[in-house]
Amino acid sequence: MKPLYKSIFIISDIEGSSGCWNRKASAFKTKEWADACVDMSLDVNSLVTALFEAGVEDIRIKDFHRTGYNLIPELIDKRAELILGYKATPIPGVGDPGHATGLMMIGMHASSGRGGFISHTLTSRIKNLECNGRLLSEAELVSMVLAPYGISPLFFSGCPVACEEARGVIPHILTYPIDKSIHPDNFSKEIWRQGLQKSALQSIENNRAVPFFRGGPFRAVMTMRDGPREAENLAKKWHLPCEEDKVMIESPTPDSLFNTLLKVTYLTPVIEKILSPGLSLFHLYGKAGQRWVYSRLKKEGKTLFNR
């Protein structure tokens, strides 16, 4: 019997993965990060193989952490399509979800200001991000911009705080937590991945899930971690209103909110004008980091690439 959802789009982050237990593991070009990239890839692969075995026919995976080059292709089922690096279109940053009808988000974290393990929204420079009077998470943002494509959020995995937040906002989504409060030596990655598989498989039969449509207008308030000076500089750069350590953004639709947040958070007006070559350079930066991971793992005698 084929599952209700046969085409799945996976968003994968690193903070809620089985190999990230401190900030160094979510950083760039650290030993901890190299190891976390391996476990992030194995987490994704455990999910992908289970979905294919259950009858899912098409899977696309978006690496959604930092440079977008954290996943190791050699460790992931070749039947799945990887989207590495950030794309300008059709969904800025995310790329093309293809024909997906179901969304799964794994390795995720809670929103800025929420608490939980390495919680943030888009960047740690934001102390908290409120939208229409409540905290806004990346899970909610991604679910909103994918809704017009007919994609329903089915499954979410992250720390318990992140899972609780997702359940509280996205109707009928199933969640599976990873407990980051215990010592990693007392954590069984294999047992956890088995639970991840089981919960995700339940979600592809969820006939209550629906696309996460949200109507505007949206009023977002970004409170900057470094205070009024950073907020003022950011507001001047993008011609936005500012009050003390807060930058205000008015957007009529989810797409415009998402696009503006990405622009304000990651770009400058100059880079926005040369976005295509800018993204190409950023891809090279990400690929260089990925090659560094390969080199480090091989020096340590890891046999990952003989799989």
Image: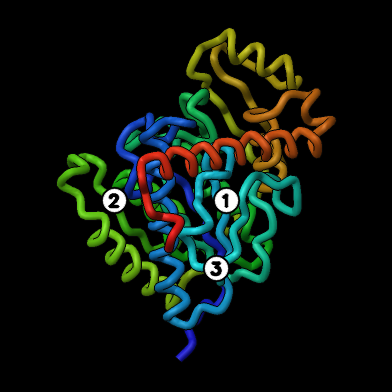
Q: Residue at 52%, 30% (x, y): give it.
A: 123
Crowd rating for badge 2 (residues with CA inside 10 Å; few <14, some 14–19, many 20+): many
Q: Nearer the viewer, mark 1 or mark 3?
A: 3
SS label for mark 3: loop
Instruction: Report the residue marked by disc 2.
Output: 178
- Mark linked to residue 10: none
Q: Is residue 93 something that shows in the picture?
A: yes
Q: Residue at 64%, 34% (x, y): give it.
A: 285
Crowd rating for badge 3 (residues with CA inside 10 Å; few <14, some 14–19, many 20+): few
Q: Is residue 224 above or below residue 131?
A: above
Task: Give how far apart the Cα atoms at labels 1 and 3 are.
Answer: 25 Å
Q: Earlier in the sequence, mark 2 or mark 1?
A: 1
Residue at the extreme left: 186
> Is label 2 in contact with label 1 (beta carbons under 8 Å)?
no
Colouring mode (rainbow / by chain / secondary structure / one colour): rainbow
Give left or right: position of 186 versus 91: left
SS label for mark 1: helix
Front-lying residue, 224 or 303: 303
Q: Quadrant of residue 237?
A: top right
> What's the amino acid at mark 1?
Val
Q: Nearer the viewer, mark 3 or mark 2?
A: 3
Give left or right: position of 180 versus 141: left
Q: Residue at 61%, 69% (x, y): give it.
A: 100
Rendered location of residue 210, percent (x, y): 53, 68
Instruction: Report the residue marked by disc 3.
Output: 78
Front-lying residue, 152 or 47: 47
